[in-house]
Each structure stands twice: as C-alpha cells, then as structure tokens.
Amino acid sequence: MIISIASGKGGTGKTTIAVNLALSLPKGTVQLIDCDVEEPNSHLFLSPTIHQVTSMGIPVPRIDETRCSSCSRCAQVCEYHAIAVILKTVLVFDELCHGCGACSYLCPEKAIFEVEKEIGIVQEGSSDGIPFVNGVLNVGEPMASPLIRKVKEKIQRDKIVILDAPPGTACPVIETVKGSDFCILVTEPTIFGLNDLELAVGMLEKLGIPKGVVINKANVGDREVWDYCQSKHIPILMEIPMDRQIAESYSKGIPIVVENSSYIPQFLSLFKKVEEFYESSQRK
C-alpha cells in the first residue's frame, strides 16, 4: 500500500505525520520515502545510515556544428523553449530542458547529440529497521519532478510505503502523489489552512486518489475546516492538539512517538482508518 502525505502549503506537519506514522507501524513492514527533494527533512528525525548514493541526471542536447544547417527544426519541436536559433546560431538553455529528446530525434541532419547533466542525488539507507530513501536536488535546479520519479523507483511494493510530499499543489506534488493508494492531507484550522486544503482536495479529485484529512493544531482557529470536510464527505482521520511537548520534541529532532509513546496508538488508529477508507473506496 502506498500512502502519500501532502498539504496545500508548507509547515502544516507533513513530515511530522510521515515520520511518526512510520515509527509507529511494526518494524519490517514500512518504508519511508522523502519526496520533498528541494528541502528534504525526514532524515533529521530518523537519522538513517546512508549506504548508497546515486547521481541522477537528465539528457540535454548539444549541437554538432559541422552537421547543423540552422533549419530551426529543433527549436520548433521544443515545447519548453530550451532551444533557440538566432542568426544561424543554435542556443541551448539547459535550465529549460526537460530531457524529452524530441530535438535529437527529429533533427533532419542528425546534428544533435545528448549529454547527461546531473540535477541531484538519490540517497538510500535505513533507520532502526525502516528502509529510507530521499532525493536531494542540486541548488539552482528548477525541475524537481525528474528526481522525484527516480526516487519513487525505489518503492518496495511488499511494504507499506509512506511518501512525504513537497508542499503545495504544483508539479512536484502531483508527481509524488500520482499512483498512491491513499493520500493523507495535513491542514490547520485557519483561513489559510482551509484555502490551501481546498486546492489540494481539487488536485486529488482530478487524480482520482482517495483522501482523508489530519488536522494539526486542532484546538486553535475556527471550525471551518471541519465544516468543509463534512460538506465534501472527506473523513477526518486524526486531530493533533497544539501541544508544547510536540513542539519541543520537534525542535530537538525527536519524533513525538519516541518522546511520548502514548501517541503510538493514535498513529496506529490513523493507519487503520486509512486502510478502512481505502478498502471502502475500492468497493465503490
């Protein structure tokens, strides 16, 4: 089962839910993957031992000027405007290239070849029996999705896989949650939390992924998030209070289930609800 954990904004507690849920489940049954490749932080709480680091790149075009006729076919087929032909000179903008290969495939002179450009790394390791994977995007790289796809290739299908998604609802989030069996949306009971929750719900409805909500800092704000979930028939899976102990534990890099084991049954109950709602959605 693949469970993604997302939200419409940053700072709602996605990593808190992902890490504590992974630690609460029986050892040997779960894998945690941090797909927030631009700012991964699950490792700060798990402290995994990394045993393999793999470079990841995308193919970018280079021009053989001895063959190039400046016909502009490459610039015409590039959907991302990564190639321009100006005064019979072909300019390649690596930062815009998505590595699709259309330019080299369709070049009539066969004047384009490809070289690999590193965009980041994939790290694999483990922590107390929990297999762990994350990606780290190189500073300045604009595209996270290719690296996220590479990270997701490490999914172990025989385990409960928890995907810690990036914030927001843009391409990196879609790439992360795509293919999930269930998505947990983490939100806060504020007008900003509600606005971003609505965006995330709309995204998951388009993708057809079953979903439920965890409300963090549940004893602050108003009741509009509850009303919205009720109106959309979205189950509220768990409520976490504004608790100083949780905040202090988080600031020290200690998962709350390690600091206070009384939270373990709550996270096990969260997983049980996810299982039940997923099975229910499959029967419809």
Image (tube, rainbow, N blue to C red):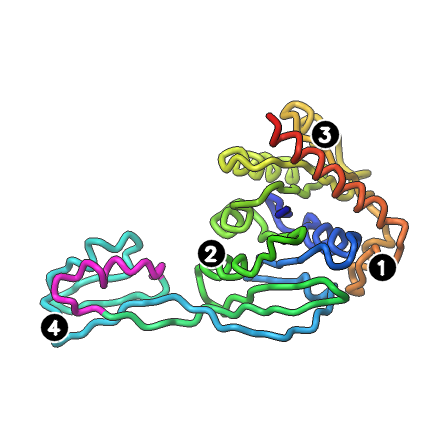
Q: Nearer the viewer, mark 4 or mark 3?
A: 4
Q: Amino acid at mark 3?
A: Trp
Where are the magenta residues, as a range?
A: 96-112
| Distance of label 2 from label 1 (alpha carbons) | 33 Å
Reading the image, the residue beneath label 3 is 226
Q: At x 50% / y 37%, what residue is drawn?
A: 207
23 left or right of 176 in image: right
Does 98 appear in magenta? yes
Circle 2 — which element? helix
Judged left or right of residue 167, residue 149 is left
Residue 222 in the figure: left or right of residue 90: right
Q: Which quadrant would residue 214 be assigned to in this image?
A: top right
Q: Give the CA separation, mark 4 to mark 3.
A: 64 Å
Secondary element at image label 1 = helix
- The residue that label 4 is drawn on is 67
Mark 1 belongs to which amino acid? Answer: Val
Q: Earlier in the sequence, mark 2 or mark 3?
A: 2
Q: Earlier in the sequence, mark 4 or mark 3?
A: 4
